[in-house]
């Protein structure tokens, strides 16, 4: 990013709170994101990571009108990230305010300390327009959208640049300064978005003193466009520029243009994309739970998603004595062979978990959900539930978990209780941080 202008210029080595600023990662009109390294034990959440992303927003400078707008966008993002902690949304560790009168360009800036990503989906698509892992990525994006809608929020600006990929290739939704909390069937957001991912009704929006009225179906439209782009490398409406495609979307909504999906779009996805891109919000898919189930079936997500590894990585495979694990009666003793196995480049699968390492430590992974501290419980669904089911069945030999289907039903609840009793944990049937650590245990107790 050398030579580029940044919304907020911060010198390398600058200290803010417990963090030291590194190089820039990304920059937009309203914020610049830098790498961050933790240099002391400040008042962050327990066991903060060693590295993070530091998002600087210039809320202490500029004109009064710009300041008001920036503060509104910043408050939206902070409000959502402070209230929601779900596995597919980027995590915020803390917020800071720069107090440095000697640097007026930085003084008063807001800093969000966020989970560190390796790249965004836009960067991946620039390198590989139709990535092999596209269906699996879309399943995770849809899962994040469902988590957001289920909590009563609309993203408002879903696009490739706002889909982040972590080091293990898993997806996080990010950039929530356009997000809005639902008030009944509507929410209110600033009156702008990214044209290619904006539904046609928002080109002539309902605006009042609180902003633009938006509905959850605006995210559904954006997901339909995103799916078409990821699976075919092209937009679903004609036009050489974003403005031309916006005009085509307007004509399509008014009946003057037909939706011409690419012949390259896989058959399993054609109806999904078409229903996401219905010309009016009334005809569009609205239930993200039902959409997620259809997307997961189309993606084969329950069959252990193969996501792109953005950097070369070597998985350390531990061979397990006898049948991967020996569960001894009356306890939770798991017998592993010494860690001398030859490293393998193969990623984990549900049936063959392998050891990985991240900021939380070393542990087994059975898919591409690196959850350590999010809690899942009966009634939940999604990739985190599948991960727990895989570990229970194929690492710990508890076949009573039933099918690996991503649904936390009675059998999964019973299997978790069985595991917790064997491991000497509180047998409440939910999978929280302690249970995750035991499930992922990579060495002898």
Image (cartoon, rainbow, N blue to C red):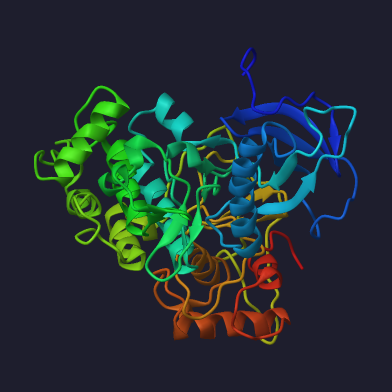
Residue lying at 66% horizontally and 60% vertically, measured from the top left: 82
- Quadrant for the N terminus in the image: top right
Q: Nearer the viewer, residue 281 or 384?
A: 281
Q: Percent position (x, y) of residue 142? A: 39, 55
Position of 212 with respect to 259 (left or right) is right
Look at the image and tell me whether residue 342 can be seen: no
* Residue occupying image coordinates x 37% and y 59%: 216
In this view, the residue in front, 255 or 67, is: 67
Q: Position of residue 227 (x, y in %)?
A: 31, 44
Q: Nearer the viewer, residue 97 or 341?
A: 97
Residue 236 x/y as whole percent: 22, 37
Is residue 387 visible in this depiction of the protein?
yes
Compared with 424, 42 (above or below) is above
Residue for point 30% across, 63% down? 286
Q: Position of residue 187 (x, y in %)?
A: 44, 60
Left or right of 313 on screen, residue 13: right
Where is 49 relative to 424, above or below?
Answer: above
């Amino acid at each position: 990013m050398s030579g580029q202008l940044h919304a907020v210029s911060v010198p390398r080595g600058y200290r803010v709170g417990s963090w030291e600023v590194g190089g820039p990662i990304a920059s937009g009109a309203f914020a610049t994101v830098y790498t961050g390294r933790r240099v002391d034990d400040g008042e962050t959440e327990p066991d903060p990571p060693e590295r993070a992303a530091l998002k600087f927003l210039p809320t202490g400078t500029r004109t009064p009108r710009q300041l008001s707008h920036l503060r509104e966008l910043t408050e939206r993002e902070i409000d959502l990230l402070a209230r929601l902690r779900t596995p597919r949304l980027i995590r915020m560790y803390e917020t800071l305010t720069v107090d440095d009168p000697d640097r007026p360009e930085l003084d008063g800036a807001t800093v969000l300390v966020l989970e560190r990503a390796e790249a965004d989906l836009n960067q991946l698509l620039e390198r590989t327009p139709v990535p092999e892992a596209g269906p699996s990525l879309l399943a995770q994006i849809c899962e994040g959208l469902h988590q957001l809608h289920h909590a009563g929020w609309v993203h408002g600006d879903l696009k490739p640049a706002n889909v982040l990929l972590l080091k293990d290739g898993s997806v996080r939704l990010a950039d929530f300064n356009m997000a809005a909390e639902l008030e009944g069937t509507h929410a209110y957001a600033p009156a702008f978005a990214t044209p290619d991912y904006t539904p046609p009704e928002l080109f002539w929006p309902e605006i009042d003193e609180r902003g633009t009225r938006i509905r959850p179906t605006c995210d559904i439209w954006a997901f339909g466009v995103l799916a078409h782009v990821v699976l075919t490398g092209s937009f679903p409406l004609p036009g050489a520029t974003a403005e031309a495609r916006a005009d085509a979307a307007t004509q399509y909504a008014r009946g003057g243009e037909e939706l011409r999906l690419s012949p390259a779009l896989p058959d399993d996805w054609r109806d999904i994309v078409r229903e996401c891109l219905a010309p009016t919000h009334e005809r569009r898919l609205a239930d993200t739970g039902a959409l997620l189930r259809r997307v997961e079936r189309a993606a084969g997500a329950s069959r252990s998603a193969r996501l792109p590894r953005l950097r070369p990585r070597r998985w350390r495979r531990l061979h397990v004595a006898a049948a991967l694990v020996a569960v001894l009666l009356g306890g939770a003793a798991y017998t592993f062979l010494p860690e001398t196995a030859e490293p393998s480049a193969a990623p984990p699968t549900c049936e063959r978990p392998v050891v990985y390492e991240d900021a939380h430590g070393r542990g087994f992974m059975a898919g591409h959900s690196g959850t350590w501290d999010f809690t899942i419980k009966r009634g939940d669904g999604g990739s985190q539930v599948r991960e727990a089911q895989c570990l229970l069945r194929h690492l710990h030999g508890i076949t009573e978990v039933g099918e690996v289907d991503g649904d936390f039903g009675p059998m999964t609840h019973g299997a978790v209780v069985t595991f917790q009793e064997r491991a000497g944990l509180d047998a409440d049937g939910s999978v929280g941080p302690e249970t995750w650590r035991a499930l992922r245990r990579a060495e002898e107790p």
